[in-house]
Image (cartoon, rainbow, N blue to C red):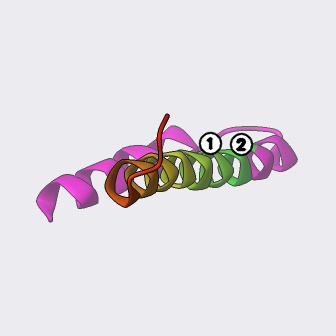
């Protein structure tokens, strides 16, 4: 759990004192979007691997 809090701290510090604010918001939304896409790709791979679909 300490690793997750460390990554959270790094994420928050990366956007401290950044201007313009709309760009910071855009980058935060984009990082969440990328995390969701990565999760979906891993999920799709695991689903195909364990359900017997051929690649």
* Chief secondary structure of the magenta portion: helix
Judge left or right: residue 20 versus residue 51: right
Residue 32 pos. (x, y %): 62, 54
Residue at (26, 60) in percent of width and height? 5
Q: Observer-nearest residue: 35 or 10? A: 35
Which label sits on residue 27? 2
Left or right: 48 as drawn, with respect to 29: left
Magenta segment: does it hold 33?
Answer: no
Q: Nearer the viewer, residue 16 or 39?
A: 39
The mark found on residue 17 in the picture is 1
- Dot 1: element: loop
Residue at the image position 72 percent from the left and 54 percent from the top: 29
Residue at the (49%, 34%) spot, across then down: 55
Q: In this rendering, would 45 be left or right of 17?
A: left
Residue 47 x, y percent position in the rendering = 43, 58
Quarter of the image with the N terminus is bottom left
Q: Residues within 10 Å of mark 1 (few under 14, many from 20)?
A: few
Q: Which mark is residue 36?
A: none
Residues rendered magenta in the picture? 1-26
The crowding category of the residue bearing disc 2, from other C-alpha atoms within 10 Å (few below 14, some 14 to 19, many at least 20), is few
- Based on the picture, tell me whether residue 8 belongs to the magenta stretch: yes
Left or right placement of residue 8 versus residue 26 in this view: left
Occupied quadrant, residue 19: top right
Q: Depth check: give the residue in front, 46 or 4.
A: 46
Whole-percent x, y for residue 33 in the image: 67, 52
């Amino acid at each position: 759990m300490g690793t997750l809090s460390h990554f959270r701290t790094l994420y928050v510090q990366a956007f401290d004192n950044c201007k313009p604010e709309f760009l910071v918001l855009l980058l935060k939304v984009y990082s969440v979007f990328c995390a969701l896409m990565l999760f979906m790709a891993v999920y799709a791979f695991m689903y195909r691997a364990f359900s017997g679909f051929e690649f």
